[in-house]
Amino acid sequence: MSEVEDISKTELWLVETTLKERYGDNPPEIELGDAEIRLYPSDRELTACPLVHWQHNKCHFVIFKIGDNRYRAQFFYRSYQQYGTGVNQYDDLTECLVSLLQVQADHQAQESGDIKKKRR
């Protein structure tokens, strides 16, 4: 099993700053952790990846660091209610964070009936 370098102080600062901008004076508490994930669906081995986690209004947010300047994001409510951003990996943490927050906000608005679901 290979490993990815830990979340840096700069990356953590970026997450903290973005969440302060998003949530104002009461940003959620950030937790650091690790997860073993498959980087690609065809991978047989798991890769240990550091992650950043926070919770807001019963929604959990996770950003996985999957390599140098490579990130993956998802949010979930329960184990069977997991959602991604539609992008498999980002090479910019700010873009990853903003996309995750926007997709979750759109999802929440859709679920509450504030916006209609798009037809494909």
Image: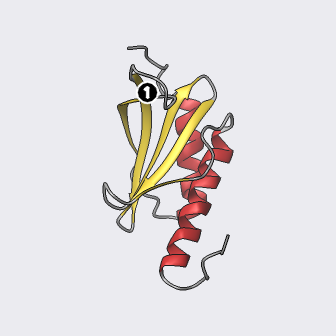
The residue closer to the viewer here, 85 or 64, is 85
- Whether residue 24 is visible here, answered yes or no, is no
Say whether residue 94 is left or right of residue 104.
right
The quadrant in which residue 82 appears is: bottom left
Q: Residue at x 45, y 64 (%)?
A: 26
Q: Position of residue 79 (x, y in %)?
A: 31, 54
Q: Position of residue 4 (x, y in %)?
A: 48, 20
Q: Residue at x 43, y 17 (%)?
A: 3
Q: Secondary structure at mark 1?
A: strand
Q: Say above or below: 7 vs 12.
A: above
Colour mode of the rendering: secondary structure
Number of residues whose C-alpha sits closer than 10 Å to that of mark 1, classed few (under 14), some (14–19) or many (20 or more):
many
The quadrant in which residue 70 appears is: top right
Instruction: Identify residue for label 1.
Output: 49
- Image quarter in which the N terminus is found: top left
Q: Say above or below: 18 vs 120.
A: above
Q: Residue at x 66, y 44 (%)?
A: 94
- Image quarter in which the C terminus is found: bottom right
Q: Which residue lies most toward the left here?
A: 79
Q: Position of residue 49 (x, y in %)?
A: 43, 27
Q: Position of residue 83 (x, y in %)?
A: 48, 56
The residue closer to the viewer here, 77 or 57, is 77
> Total label count?
1
Q: Amino acid at mark 1?
A: Cys
The residue closer to the viewer here, 110 or 52, is 110
Q: Residue at x 53, y 47 (%)?
A: 16
- Whether residue 44 is visible here, answered yes or no, is yes
Q: Say above or below: 31 vs 76.
A: above
Q: Which residue lies most toward the top here?
A: 2
